[in-house]
Structures are given as structure tokens and as C-alpha cells.
Image: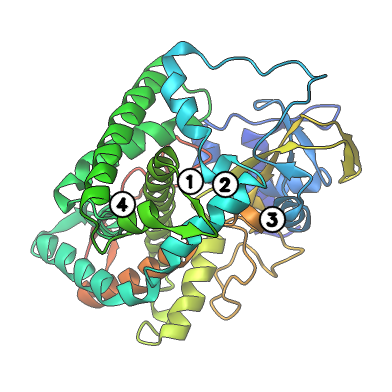
Amino acid sequence: MTAIQASRTEDAAAVVHVDADQSVSCDPRNPAFFNNPYPAYDLMRDLGPCFLWRDYDHWCFAGYDLVNAILRDRRFGREFRRTPDEPAAPSPPEHLREFYAFEAQSLLEREPPEHTRLRRLINRAFVSRQILSLRPRIEALAHELIDRFIDQAQVDLLPAFAEKIPVIVIADLIGVPRQMADQLLAWSHAMVAMYEFKRDQAIENAAERATTEFSAYIGDLIAERRRAPRDDLLSHLVSVSDHGEELADEEVVTTTILLLNAGHEATVHALGNSVFCLLREGAVDAVDWSNEAAVARACEELIRFDAPLHMFTRFVLEDLEIGGRAFRRGETVGVLLGAANRDGAKYAEPHRLDFARGGEGNTSFGAGIHFCVGAPLARLEMAVALPVLLERLPGLRLATEPQYADRYHFHGLSGLQLTWD
């Protein structure tokens, strides 16, 4: 065992307890884990194809091949439809009625045939916006944001740059006024907090309020677009049709909010994590930032190296065997995207940034029918924003050592204080 391997083993042992039955106890809220989960993932993979994560009380998969396979396997899904012979699902708590009604319409939560219809209609509207044509707009926005802080001695890049780019771009795309960006962020943060480990009543109440207010706001915009359509995504979602099928208003509301919430959270963390990794690893000069192809490869490797999302869950939709274990219909399994992306069976020297390989095949945006609909936009925002940032701020470096936020399974920094020459 090398010194590096020994160090990683010690780091994992400090946060992961393996029981006699090979189940795992690992508190996702332990700072030693969420600041650097990768040694723990190595240990989890070594336990075998799957393991019971007791803190979540479901089985998880950490190896690349099975994570990738489960994401593509239609025997696993986000929507569990109970048969008449099965017990009815418990009703959602009254204080979360609006949140769960909203979720029930989400593309993320549906399976075919409803998912197929929604995805087809959304793709017709979303792709019609010609994502690549947004490059000049994203570049101009990156310069505008840097202009606001370039005369300062240092900056927290997350609120000043990484958060602003995705929310303003998607707001412009949807047709929401830019002055609403801060409010959109507040609603988004409140809603996605529902997916954190061991949420509390305050988080739930804030999510319910945000869902109600956000939905009402988008509903009012939909009514406006029906009266007076514009050249924006919301108007396209309102009017899109395919063989007589259309999106209902509540589906437009849910889709619009999903595009903001999911796209924003992933891109913010992808940008912040990438800048941090480039500076920490001393890898800025390893990329030709003037070469679009080289930048695209670098961004894909950065997304692999420190993914913005680390766990997706799926229901088992039929009795099956996978990874040497039998699963029953209705069970929940977790697929660990961050662990799959650091699997040495897929990537040689997985804990090293290697821009030549370009992170090909990483699972950071999922796979299969639930592959992230906003992935092309997120990749473009990274590929445009990073070169502008590094060109405008020569000698960019960490002003303080950042910490990751306590919100696993989202994996992103709580702040990123930078300075430059």
C-alpha cells in the first residue's frame, strides 16, 4: 500500500463504520465526510457490488458499471405505482400538500408513458431555443459580472459569479425579468433543501411557502403569455404541441420551476467545484482555455472529478437480482454518482485530474431516460464562464481554504474566497 493509499484508508476509517454484516454507518452530515467523501467511497466500493447504508436505510451502489446500468434499467424508476393488492401510499402531510402536488407533475418523478410525453414536449420547446446560440449572451454576462468585482481585493465567487450565471441565463431563457433573480434563488434554495439528509420542520415549512409562491408567480406569467406570447421558453412551453398533445398549465409551472431549480443547483456547484479543483490541483495552466475542444474536455473531466450531485435514488419496480442481491418490488436503492466517477475500474488513477481523457462517460448528469434535460446548457455555461474568468483574473488563487456545505447529496462549496494579481 502506498503512502497516499494508506492516508485515504485512514480518512475513510474516520467517517465510515463497517458492521459485521458489511452494512455501513456513515453520517452524511459529518464534515469529514461531506468535505471529502472520496476516501469513504473507495471503502464502500471495496465492500462489494452493493451495501446497506444504515443512515439512509437503503442499499447503495458505488461502482461505475452498476450505477450506470441501474440509471438505464427500466426496472428501476422514480415513480412507484402501487397495484390494487398493495397497501395504499401514505398521504403526504398537510403542511407539505403543495410541495408534493408540485412534485407529482415533475418530469423527474414520472415514468413512461407520462414521462415519454412530457420529455418529448419539453424537448421540442427547450431544444427549439438553440442552446448553442446562447454562447455570446453567456460570455457577455460573465464579463459583466466580473466588471462588478474586479476592482476589489478579493471576492466570494459563489454569490458574485457562480450563482448569478445560471439563474440569469435561465431567467432570460424562460422570460422572467432579471430583477427577479434573487427571489428565484431564494425560492429554489428553499425547495431543493427538501432533498437534504434529515430535513427539519423549518425546512419543510419554507419549502411549502416557496412552492406556493413560486407556482403562483409562474402561473401569472403563463396567463400573460397566453394573452401575449413572446419569443421565450415559457411561451414555447405554453404553446408546444405534438400530435394534438400539449402541456397542461400545471405541467408548464412544474417544468419551468424544475428547469430553474435543477439547472441552477447543478451548474452553481459545477462552476464552484471546478474553480476550486483547478486552483487546489495547480491545473489552470494544463488547459488551453482558448481552444473550445480542449475546454469542453476539461469541463467534462472537472465534472467527473468533483460532481455537483452525489446520490440519486430509484424504486425497484419489479422483483429482480442485481449485484449479487435479490431486491423486492418497492424497495429503494441509491446510486452514488460521485463514487462511480472515481471508480478505478473505469478511470485509471481516478483521483487525479486528467484532461486528456476528458471525463468521458461520467454519470454526473445521470443516464437513461432521466438524463438531465439541461445538461447541454450546463456544459455550455461552464465552457464559456471558466475561460472568461481565468482570462480576466490572472494569478487567480484561493484567499482562504473553502469548505463544502452541509447538504449532501448536493455537493458544493459554502463559499469560495478568491484573490488575483
Q: Visible in this render: residue 338?
A: no
Q: Are marks 2 and 1 in contact (CB under 8 Å)?
A: yes
Left or right: residue 85 compared with residue 252: right
**Mark nearer the N terminus (1 vs 3):** 3
How far apart are labels 3 and 4 at the CA level? Answer: 28 Å
Identify the element where label 2 is drawn: loop
Q: Quadrant of the C terminus?
A: bottom left
Towards the viewer: 10 or 143: 143
Image x and y of residue 227, in percent: 22, 49
Image x and y of residue 61, in percent: 74, 45
Residue kind at label 2, given as amino acid type? His
Residue kind at label 4, given as amino acid type? Leu
How far apart are labels 4 and 2 at the CA level? Answer: 20 Å
Identify the element where label 4 is drawn: loop
Left or right: residue 245 compared with residue 61: left
Q: Which residue is mark 2?
A: 310
Image x and y of residue 17, in percent: 71, 30
Q: Which residue is mark 1?
A: 411
Q: Which residue is mark 3?
A: 5
Residue kind at label 1, given as amino acid type? His
